Amino acid sequence: MKVSIDINALKDSKKLIGSIDQGTSSSRFIVFTDEGKIAASAQVEHTQIYPESKPGWHEHDPLEIWYSVVQCVNAVFVKYPELELDAIGITNQRETTIAWNAVTGMPYYNAIVWDDVRTDPIAKKIAAEGTSSSNQGMDRLRSRTGLPLASYFSGTKVRWLIENVPQLHSDLMSDAERSNVRIGTIDTWLVYQLTGRCSSSDGNTNGAATICDDAVAFTSTFPKGNVGGLFVTDVTNASRTLFMDIETCEWCSDLVYEVLRMQAFPVETALAKIEPSSSVYGPCSGEEGGIVSALKGVPIASILGDQQAALFGQVCFDKGMAKCTYGTGLFLMMNTGLDIVPSVHGLLTTVAYKVGSESTVYGLEGSVAFSGSVIQWLRDQLDIISDAAESETLANHVQSNDGLYFVPAFAGLFAPYWRSDARGVIVGMTASHTKHHICRAALEATAYQAKEVFDAMYHDSRISLASLRVDGGAVANNLLMQFQADMLDAPVIKPQVTETTAMGAAFAAGLAVGVWKDLSEIHQMWAVDKAWKPTMSANKRDSYFMGWKKAVTKSFGWVEEDVLANVEEETQTDKYRTRTVVVAAASFLCITGLILLRSKKV
């Protein structure tokens, strides 16, 4: 548990907003002042569950998730019992899906995490089930949802749960029990717990499900969940399910049936009410068995998926503004205003946010699988560096990559290619290359991939990028940030407060309760810490990028299509820990080994 308290900031601020940031690897509770400064924080990691003999499966215990939030909130209040909050906001890992029983308060199964790949066959099956002649395949629901059919999104996870958890299926088929089923994402689960009450049911505290075949049954050592809480979600999280019509921002029964193929599914009771991102949903109950009782009566006033929260925290309120979060991978999002921009270049059309009764704001999003994890690979697998900072030190030993390119397609390529047959390659090597060139090429790969996504955004939206606001661990790397500015030919800007995800939830919550009167007042609190401006000539930029594009083509076709279904690819991603399964050509490994042996002499 990491706890930090700024007593003076807490005492001096007239208004305080709490932000629950529930991520893939940890939960955090951060208190912001009315000037947008961090006054207190607590963070605790939670367990990553990788079921044995199930490559690519990734789960969380929903009760542990809730308890980790409780720990963080209580830790702050223990340090400063006088704390009084005007509101709390919630931001969360998106797409991660939970099903639970409203009577017992118990989950039917573990939460299936966003990066879990078990539902890839389901996504392909849904694509094949379509009958429309105009929009076939993995994109057949894109015009209504903004999303391709993929294991990434919640709808495929819901179908897996229904088809593989007998008790859940039985309850949904029962007229008496159907209305007791609740299914939602992490935000919905947390609001339900924060506003609920202790269950009086004598339900099984070790879980409500007995899983068929060799699937893992739900068990937990944590107290059972609450019942009777508010059952809500927001438009950003709902837009990642495959169930929401992106134009109406409402659940669509036709879409639900297209994904689940279940006529009896009770949309009205099983799916949460969709609300704006910034709105007062209701007060915390403070009746969680004495847990977080200090929050009793505090209004929950915002919900935002993590990447949308980062966009809000970076105050990207105008059309054409964009942010990039550099973590294990890359998450890039551009505000497209009130326009729903269909993507034909491999991006996702999504909801950016909705403030109260105002019109919904939309965005384009692109994700890259491997960014920070590449540097971890250099450290943990090749032993070239001892820590992330050393990658910049070594890369600065050379002025360029000298024609060496590193395409980190360890488990395929995401946006804008979506090539599952691609694998990692290093190309253009000569006997003069060293580990310095490899480090530089690894860093440059992040910037090249970001450029490809933003090029796709321009082609989809015809909106030119004025600047890029950045956050995440990689913003500490000056070489990378400068190269990013050069590749985009646009300024790259780092804010003073880099906890932009939690800040976005706090901004949205404060806006809902009147701490800030409008978006312009919030915008005034955002401040620049550092900016990198492009200095590279157009000819050099074009030449470098042409080399990258050629290198990418060399990564294609390493895995044949009929083999892909049996290839065990696993990527577990979070801000602090990454495990990567790397498949590469034997020649690639041999040549890399030669370079490393030679580098020891350099």
Image: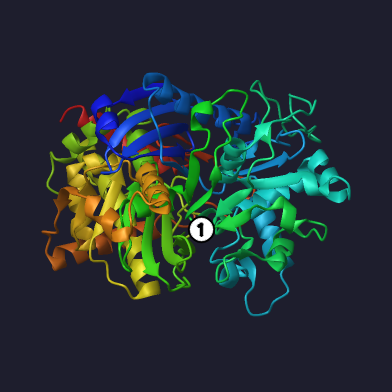
- Does residue 221 appear left or right of residue 545 in this picture? right
Mark 1 highlights which residue? Answer: 276
Give the residue at x 60% y 41%: 189
Q: Which of 352 and 403 is in front in this view?
A: 352
What number of labels is visible?
A: 1
Q: Is residue 12 visible?
A: yes
Q: In this view, does 512 lie above or below 213?
A: below
Q: Which of 85 and 599 is in front in this view?
A: 85
The image shows residue 432, relative to residue 451, as above or below, that is above
Q: Which of 116 and 500 is in front in this view?
A: 500
Query: What is the quadrant of residue 230 in the picture?
Result: top right
Can you give x and y, in whole percent of width and height, for residue 167 in the image? Answer: 82, 39
Q: Residue at the location (61% across, 36% down)?
A: 193
Q: Residue at x 58, y 23 (%)?
A: 290
Residue 580 place in picture, x, y as percent: 46, 37
Percent coordinates x, y for residue 138 in the rendering: 61, 65
Against 316, residue 388 (above or below) is above
Instruction: Indicate the amino acid at tag 1.
Output: Pro
